[in-house]
Amino acid sequence: MNGGSSPLFACLQEPFVNTATFSSLPLTPALLDNIESLGYTHLTPIQAETLPHILEGRDVIAQAKTGSGKTAAFGIGLLSRMDFSQFKVQALVICPTRELADQVCKEIRRLARFTQNIKVLPLCGGVPFGPQLGSLEHGVHIVVGTPGRLQEHLRKRSLRLDHLKVLVLDEADRMLDMGFAEAISDVISYAPTHRQTLLFSATYADPIREISKKFQFKPLTVSIDSSHHDSVIAQQFYQTDKARRLNALGYLLAYHRPESTVVFCNTKQDCQEVAAALDNCGFSVQALHGDLEQKHRDQVLVRFANKSCSILVATDVAARGLDIKELQAVINYELPWDPEVYVHRIGRTGRAGKQGLALSLCTVQEQNRVQAIEDYLSITAKWDDIAPFQMNFAERFQPPMVTLWLDGGRKNKLRPGDILGALTGDAGVAGADIGKIDIFDNHAYLAVRQDSADRVLAWLKNGKIKGRSFMVRKSQWG
């Protein structure tokens, strides 16, 4: 593929190499000695770009994935702000799941081995409330918790944030995906206005920008992905004819088996017909077009966003504002007339440094559209062949998640943390098996991994959330 001049198609640059060491930072000798004893020598990219500013007390918003060294970055930062003689909550880390909160607690404790007086307390749902009350009464320096349980302690006034110096939102995008936006706002409302706020997220979409704008003061923005490499979108064009276009689409989906794909059609009628044909052939698919009622549209988007539906067949108008993380592929069932629309379509894949796939079907009569795209992007189209494929029913590649419907929502005072806490606590389900949680006024949607769905469904039918039972079933949208 000829990359052309567009930044969408820039090649990966050389990996970022950092030579800065922790000794270059204004840290106490005891903390530096402990960091060295842990085997930490050179700063990771996220640490090199955030720690100097964190130590200065600045608000920071950082795009960083798990494994980037972000926990050490904010952990070292908040430990540098501690007054260990004062057994008051001076730092709060909000995490999406109990598993992550436990990991963060362990890492902070390792970093804090240079002092014997540090008290780090996890506050998460799914564990008894009483022992947490006892620990808070004895005084702690750092609290790491999930939104729902933090809300409970704050409302009972067993947790006080009057002396808070540093607030950390870890994996903020995951918390928003799980429906914790309101809970996060509620927790932060108890914190002092004058504080340092650090926000870490794997993506930097509009919801993250909004939460930063709401809770941070002139934050420094760091994006390791965008700072050091651009994403690559592999573009492929396939010649077909009108009679074989649907078979060609089936071949591309069966061959590449993308976990999440948006198929673009130019008309609502084609959109509905293509989705129906794929559904009849065993693909996991939903249609999104302008004739859908808002309730049905919400359901379609919930299911596609939480990865319990693999394929979304959409028109350009209906897909406006669609922001799905980790969209692996975009397929143009029909090329648009306007090359700028083509760029908007394929720009939905290959985000956050991930490899993206843009596949386009084209008839001989549509070659002028390809020429327009080549001219607009200064590229040379790369063509490939399609093998014969019959669109008949088969056991197709299934999405990783299943959506469960519950007959309780905001009007029942049901929150994402209540559902998550019940499943990871009483039901013993791993937090990694729970996906996006969407709460509406009178119902909720819960994404669960395929291999755990039956177990979770069985527990919800007999178990209780917040002391009451809810009707539950697998979602059957069509």
Image (cartoon, helix red, strand yellow):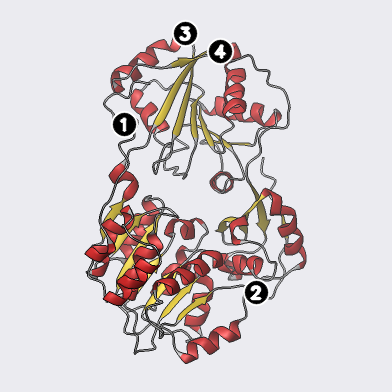
Please report contact status of discs 4 and 3: CB closer than 8 Å, yes or no: no
| Front-most of residues 381 and 322 | 381
Please report contact status of discs 2 and 3: CB closer than 8 Å, yes or no: no
Label 4 to label 2, Cα distance in Å?
A: 55 Å
Mark 2 — residue? 466
Residue 390 picture location, percent across and down: 68, 18
Q: Is residue 73 above or below residue 321?
A: below
Q: Secondary structure at mark 2?
A: loop
Of the residues shown, which amino acid type is indicated by label 3?
Answer: Val
Going 39% across and 71% down the picture, which residue do you hit?
111
Residue 435 picture location, percent across and down: 58, 55
The answer to whether residue 284 is left or right of residue 5 is right
Quadrant in the rendering for residue 283: top right
Mark 4 — residue? 242
Q: Secondary structure at mark 1?
A: loop
Q: Secondary structure at mark 3?
A: helix
Numbered circle sitting on residue 170: none
Label 1 to label 2, Cα distance in Å?
A: 51 Å
Going 42% across and 24% down the picture, which residue do you hit?
235
Label 2 to label 3, Cα distance in Å?
A: 61 Å
Quadrant in the rendering for residue 30: bottom left
| Front-most of residues 192 and 12 | 12
| Front-most of residues 77 and 303 | 77
Numbered circle sitting on residue 364: 3
Q: Residues within 10 Å of mark 1 (few under 14, many from 20)?
A: some
